[in-house]
Image (cartoon, coloured by chain):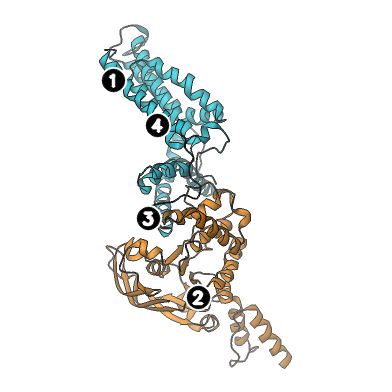
Amino acid sequence: MTSTLYLDRRSPVHRLNPVTKLVAMLTIVVIVFAVPLWWVAGLIVVGVVVPAAVVAHCGGRLLSLSLKLLLPIIVVLVLVQGLTFPGGKTVLAEWGVLALTTEGLLFALGIGSRIVCLVLTSVLFVLTTHPGDLMGALTERGMSPKFSYIISSTLQLIPAFRDRADGILLAQQARGLAVKGSPLARVKVMMPLLGPLVLGMFTDVEERSTAMEARGFGSAARRTALIPVPDSTAQRVSRWLMLVLAVAAIVVPIVFGVL
Amino acid sequence: MISLTDVSYAYPDAEALTLEHVDLEVERGSIAGIVGASGAGKTTLAKIIAGFIPHADGGELSGTVRVDGRDLSTGSLVDAVSVVGLVIQNPFNQISGAKYTVREEIAFGLENFGTPRDEMQRRVDEVAALLRIEHLLDRSPYALSGGQQQLVAIASMIVLRTPVIVMDEPTAQLDPAGTRMVFDVLSALRETGITIVIFEHKLELLQQHADRLHVVADRSIVLSGAPDDVLADDRLAQWAVGTTRYVTAGRLARERGLLPPEVPLPVSFEQAERVFDRERSVR
């Protein structure tokens, strides 16, 4: 049973302090949403995210996970914006009241490129950052351990949910539940899983909370670390530079009237 | 060491008491086994001894709960967990999820209490040697079997050096090999002087390891005594506790006239072997 999406690899990306990666991720988010040019997101994906994934030896996993998350979003985006964009004038194809317009597709491209960049960056962060390191690094910087734990453990929810859902699905199949058929039939199959899945997760959370409290998680003592999370001056400087970059990404378009 | 006097408890918004007029005494350095049917209130009692009730679960608690001379119903949960360690059923849910290796996992509680690094290293090594899990220290906690994970959970408590450890059905989700692993460490723990309260259904193993057994039924502790005396008590069936297969064999032998009524019922394999050998030689 796995419990985290983290991939244990020996790479420079993995060795970076989690706060550096977190700041980088947030800077990218700010840039792609503050700069009103769709190709900026594409440039960041090609110039930063993909090379980082290659260096981190997790390109394949990044692709498969991101595709699962992105495919439904992109399909819905293209269909809804491409076919029903209110300002669409250049019609490429028409089906009754629905019209596929250039403006609609460009709008979908603008939103879609940002979402793709956001998802790829977030997934890469999760794949290369151990939840414990993130928690330790945030706690070292004065964040409440409980808050840090919530952030880092949230990253584990997906595999924990998947493991439990697999178990429940197997149990239901053993009792004769048919899981094959049309997409609608599959959605219906998922319904009986939801009750035990959610209730089971509540039980897990309660037990985990008890176990954590039993180990002094609520202690007000200043925490120590058996193995400190490494950091460096270069990373500290780069974090400040990224902060400046993020502020510039917000201010420059306003001041120079790019908007 | 542990003293519960006239303890009653009701969960928040509950109409009825879950436990009523509970009295319990556990001696320092001993192993107390607590048995009872499912739903009898064992987990509630475990949480009361460990201080999670009332500090975490709320509810109405009356009576006194003293552990190592301290009243656990006052103060905070952090005060309570520095006196009593708690090991729960599910080994997987006791893994913090915040650590790469078993070594770091065991040290997690020490980190929370601000223990210096050198001391953490030393204590983790000591505990690993005590529980014979040195070979697991550099592995991921998620790469272990259920039994090994439960040993790590126990190690994570022992390393905190609380004078008392409460184990709430620590083998409930383990296979026989994992169960054996957990019970084997009880002997090692006895040597350290830690007081252990273990809530379990596996009566034969309790008979081998516990100094005293206590039966929870009808919302209270209805029977306490030496394991051999408790397990041979006729009333266990009415409390849905069951007994060992040797007691059952002894009762059948009595019914069939193979074992005289004055001969005590055997509760373990060794006792059964001795009793039946003797009866065979007499005949």
Q: Position of residue B212 (x, y in %)?
A: 50, 79
Q: Chain of mark 2?
A: B
Instruction: Please name the amino acid that badge 2 sits on.
Output: Gly
The residue singled out by tag 2 in the image is B29
Check chain identity for marks 3 and 2: say if they share one: no
Query: Are discs 4 and 3 less than 8 Å apart at CB?
Result: no
Say if B48 sits above or below B156 in the image.
Answer: below
The residue singled out by tag 3 in the image is A221
The residue singled out by tag 1 in the image is A251
Distance, label 4 to label 3, CA atoms, is: 27 Å
> Disc 4 or 3, which lies upstream in sequence?
4
Q: Which residue lies at the image location 36% right of the left edge and 20% below the top edge?
A: A111
The residue singled out by tag 4 in the image is A23
Decide which of B283, B91 is in the foreground and name it: B91
Disc 2: CA contacts within 10 A as few (<14), some (14-19) or many (>=20):
some
Decide which of B239, A230 is in the foreground and name it: A230
Q: Which chain is orange?
A: B
